[in-house]
Image (cartoon, rainbow, N blue to C red):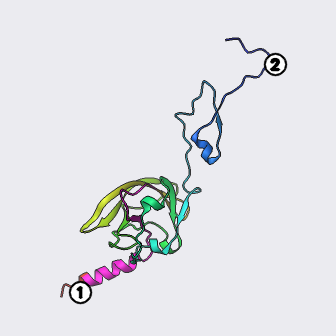
Amino acid sequence: MSALQPGRARMVPRVLTPLEDIGVVVPVDSKDSIVNKSIEIDGCTSYKVLDEKERAAGYNDIKNPKCDQRELVTPAWYRFSGGAGDKMADSVVPQGHCGTHAPGWLNGDHPVNTGEIVDRKVCFHWGSRDCKWEVNIKVKKCNGFFVYELKSTPTCHLRYCGNSGLGKQTIIKKIIKYSTKF
């Protein structure tokens, strides 16, 4: 191999990677490999919105049950908003709610500090089991909202649920439980 002569530029090979799908082209040379590098995506600034009212925990019409395994692109960061609520449901959602057969709910607390990311489990309620299926996800607290790095559900007719309407269901369950004691 000949030495680089003065006045001659050294060519850096251009490596095309899967990052091109998002518009990033990274030049590398023999000293630097793209193989072990990744781009960290900030969920607070780059997320998809789940805002359908049918995704709300209080929604109980399942004429056409939905399936996040087919309907969501995963893994990706998502934010609950609008009719779905302002965060993922964090208590058991009744079966048949959220526009699906087995609704998903966050089994654990949301993070407290802005910028904090926690690992959590989402449980899917079916039959007598509050957690028949489960998926491990990440939850991040942003400035005034939460985002969730969702993964594919284990099977169909499972769906991640927003918290809208959840309080009403909890109150109704407590009234029924209380009234049956007499």
Quarter-of-image position of residue 125: bottom left
How far from the left and from the top, in percent, is residue 34?
Answer: 57, 33
- Residue at the image position 51 percent from the left and 60 percent from the top: 78
Region in magenta? 150-176
Provide the secondary structure element on which disc 2 rests: loop
Q: Residue furthest front?
A: 64
Mark in front: 1 vs 2: 2
What kind of residue is marked 1?
Ser
Q: Are marks 1 and 2 in contact (CB under 8 Å)?
A: no
Q: Is residue 22 left or right of residue 103?
A: right
Image location (x, y in percent) of residue 56: 44, 73
164 part of magenta stretch: yes
Q: CA distance from mark 1 to mark 2?
A: 89 Å
Residue 139 in sight from this viewpoint = no
Q: Residue 90 placed where, x, y %?
A: 38, 66
The disc placed on residue 7 is 2
